[in-house]
Amino acid sequence: MSPLLDELVQALRCLPGVGAKSAQRMAFQLLERDRAGARRLADKLIAAVERIGLCQRCRTFTEDPQCSLCRASGRDDELLCVVESPADLYALEQATGYRGRYFVLHGRLSPLDGRGPRELGLDLLAERLAEGQVKELIVATNPTVEGEATAHYLAEIARAAGVSPTRIAHGVPVGGELEYIDRSTLAHAFSGRLKV
Amino acid sequence: MSPLLDELVQALRCLPGVGAKSAQRMAFQLLERDRAGARRLADKLIAAVERIGLCQRCRTFTEDPQCSLCRASGRDDELLCVVESPADLYALEQATGYRGRYFVLHGRLSPLDGRGPRELGLDLLAERLAEGQVKELIVATNPTVEGEATAHYLAEIARAAGVSPTRIAHGVPVGGELEYIDRSTLAHAFSGRLKV
């Protein structure tokens, strides 16, 4: 394989889920059938890396000072949903009818990895709550150990600001079968049962 | 999703095997965790698209006038293996101990798609055979209908130049089970049986 081709294959492996074999297939396919697509992809990669930063208000990805969700009028300023990543924000926005605002942590508390309150923008969040508009802080961090620790911390911040913290429900996934659900999810679902 | 981010997701979909969901995951991951990788990928894409062309002699991908396989001394000039794509060449080079030369068609005869002998570089192949060094033309086109038609055509060119054409064997894949092999492969394997 020519050195340039080999470098392209290596570079493609930075994409998640792309191993040696698929990277090779991608490189050959682009060179053989879609050079225009490859060039467009290169342009978009550079534009995204150079121009996409964090929204000043909610820290999601945007090329503007404030993202479209923060600028949108007609969303409920009393609800603020905290997520770990822009991908989580997007997933919620797609799946739910939520019409409040968001705040993106870009991670979760993980002191060992040097991720403390400052890295997660919690000072910005505290300022936001101090504005007084938010009534409910919906904590939608992932149900991992670190995500739960982060959720506890966020709930404290909310209470300190006189905001009511809520947590998204954890339980049996819709369509899931009890028999195949892991123990801790099942325990969660059982103890968190609701009146019907 | 911001317009730039959306454009990046769309651009990523030019990669084979990447749908809407994985493109999204890739875009978020690059922006969140590997901006350096994204920039490197963009550079390599541009370099590859701008500088990789076809080897003057065998038509495989290379950024040089002639590829490293054609320039290599110590390979057997009496053997010439014809493949449909650089990916096929690479697969053979990885899997076999073949030490002859290659010729890449970049496709197969397909008159309806406007792919005739000229598009496959068969004039260049005829010139190569006319040089008189090649003794055996190994036809390694794919065992599809068009690949077989191309193989027949190549065999005629070889015979016309006094070169002996051979075809790679088709049959039961190693590790395959007869019960699960399609009929036509099984018929091929049966009629092409060899003395042991």
Image (spheres, coloured by chain):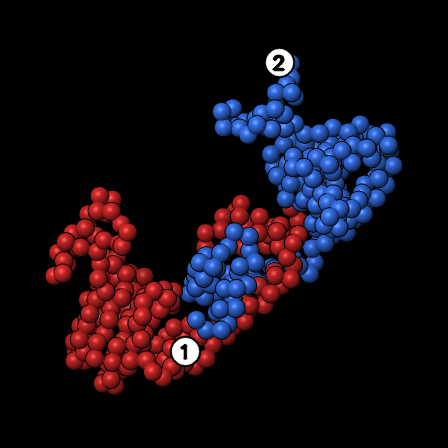
Chain colours: A blue, B red
The x and y percentages for residue A32 are: 42, 65
| Pointer 2 local density, CA inside 10 Å: few below 14, some 14–19, many at least 20 | few
| Pointer 1 local density, CA inside 10 Å: few below 14, some 14–19, many at least 20 | many
Image position of B99 with respect to A178: above or below: below
Residue A50 falls left or right of residue B116: right
Q: Nearer the viewer, residue A118 or B39?
A: A118
- Element type at marker 2? loop
Q: Residue at x 49, y 48 (%)?
A: B19
Residue type at tag 1 = Cys
Q: Residue at x 65, y 59 (%)?
A: B35
Give me the disc on residue B49: none
Q: Residue at x 54, y 71 (%)?
A: B47
Query: Can you say which quadrant of the picture contains the C terminus of chain A?
Result: top right
Image position of A181 with respect to A121: above or below: above
The residue to which callout 2 is attached is A196
Image position of B42 with respect to A59: above or below: below
The x and y percentages for residue B105 are: 32, 70
Q: Nearer the viewer, residue A109 or B188?
A: A109
Cβ atoms at labels 2 and 1 below 8 Å apart: no
Label 1 marks a residue whose chain is B
Q: CA distance from mark 2 to mark 1?
A: 72 Å
Can residue B189 be seen in the rendering of this structure?
Answer: yes
Q: Residue at x 63, y 28 (%)?
A: A170
Give me the disc on residue B67: 1
Residue B22 falls left or right of residue B129: right
